[in-house]
Amino acid sequence: MKNILTTLLGLFLSLSIFAQVQPYYNSVNLTLTGIPLKNELATKITNTHTNLLTYNDVWTVLKQTDLDPTNSTKVLLIYGYNDTDGDVKTDRTRSKNDNGGNTGDWNREHTYAKSLANPSMTTSTPSAGTDAHHLRSSDVQRNGMRGSLKFAAGSGNSSTVGGNWYPGDEWKGDVARMMMYMYLRYPTQCLPNNVGAGASVGVDPSMIELFLTWNAADPVSQYEKNRNPILESQQGNRNPFIDNPYLATLIWGGDVAEDFWNMTAVDEYDFSSQFSIYPVPANNDEIHVYFKNTLQVDVVTLYDVSGKVIATQNKPTITNNELVFDNLNEGFYFLTLQVGQTVITKKVVVN
């Protein structure tokens, strides 16, 4: 929570827009939002995926991408959480050379389970089933425990939850960002709602709220950041949601994720002609949203800086071109409006 708060507050202190955008995205129109932005990113990661790995190649790649940032002789094991309890099934790390198919080995976990894809993934030829962006080192037995279960909400360590699978507090953000990548890269084969349990978002019935929640709640780790440049060198493409989790917020809305690129400044500029917030900063515990033109808003949601929903309205009734949110505590907020396939975000201060 502290990391999310620090990152979001940093939005208000940044002096440059897109100052830290990875050069890989230079050809992407980052002023877009909603489904148009999704399509741009999908085109980018597909066109730059120039080297399709074989399933055997993946062993070598994971020994580079999945290294423990604190010990380069070991790999991190997704879903793992304890190296000291004497149970190999719960191990969080293991020697990078202990790969195979036996008890005590690590193997290649398809975080997007092969059988949940439509059509099912194959590993016999380079394809979605050999895309290392969603393949992770995992204890053989724990991998078997997950099997092909769908991901679902939970808490604590990885476990089965009502016939589904919770990946664990440490790994849920990783899973969400991998599922988002797979959806963009394989848009008909790897739908999010086929691999996760939960309600769909209004702007895109194939995306589920669960992954947006996990993306915001579990910030990008150094381990994830280390994977992206290696996979770019091996496959040619990157996972955009590791480079900036806020891209998911701009596309699908939901809980506000970290913004590494200060994109909210661009949001305000692009849509300032459509609506405004007054007074600035807001006083008397109220936020007034004024619409300069007739605008058909599908969903309006107010979040605090931790990503908690303070208020939400579907198809809000706009009276005299105005919406009012009252009884608010002092602090920073994010106001998100969904208009058709576009998600608009503004930052708000209440004194």
Image (spheres, rainbow, N blue to C red):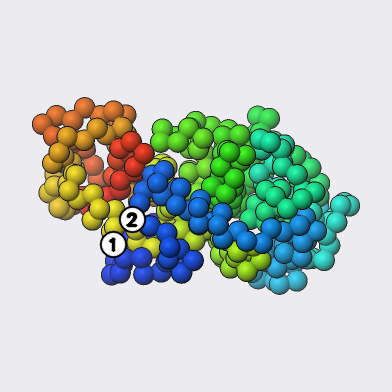
Instruction: Give percent across and percent down for residue 16.
Output: 30, 69
**Which type of secondary structure does the marked residue at label 1 adopt?**
loop
Q: Which residue is mark 1?
A: 12
What residue is drawn where x is 68% and y is 36%? 119
For numbered disc 2, what is the local secondary structure?
loop
Q: As rendered, which of 155 and 74 lies closer to the eye?
A: 74
The circle drawn on residue 31 is 2
First-in-chain label (2 vs 1) = 1
| Horizontal relation, residue 151 to residue 308: left or right | right
56 relative position to 266: left or right: right
Residue at mark 2 to residue at mark 1: CA–CA distance:
19 Å
Quadrant in the rendering for residue 52: bottom right
Percent position of residue 84, x then y: 76, 58
Please say if the residues under marks 2 and 1 sit with CB atoms less than 8 Å apart.
Answer: no
Residue 286 vs 127, above or below: the answer is above
- Say few, some or many: other residues with alpha carbon within 10 Å of mark 1 (under 14 / 14 to 19 / 20 or more): few
Q: Is residue 198 above or below residue 102?
A: above
Q: Select label 2 or label 1 by which is in front.
A: 2
* Kind of residue sitting beneath label 1: Phe
Residue 121, image x and y in percent? 72, 42
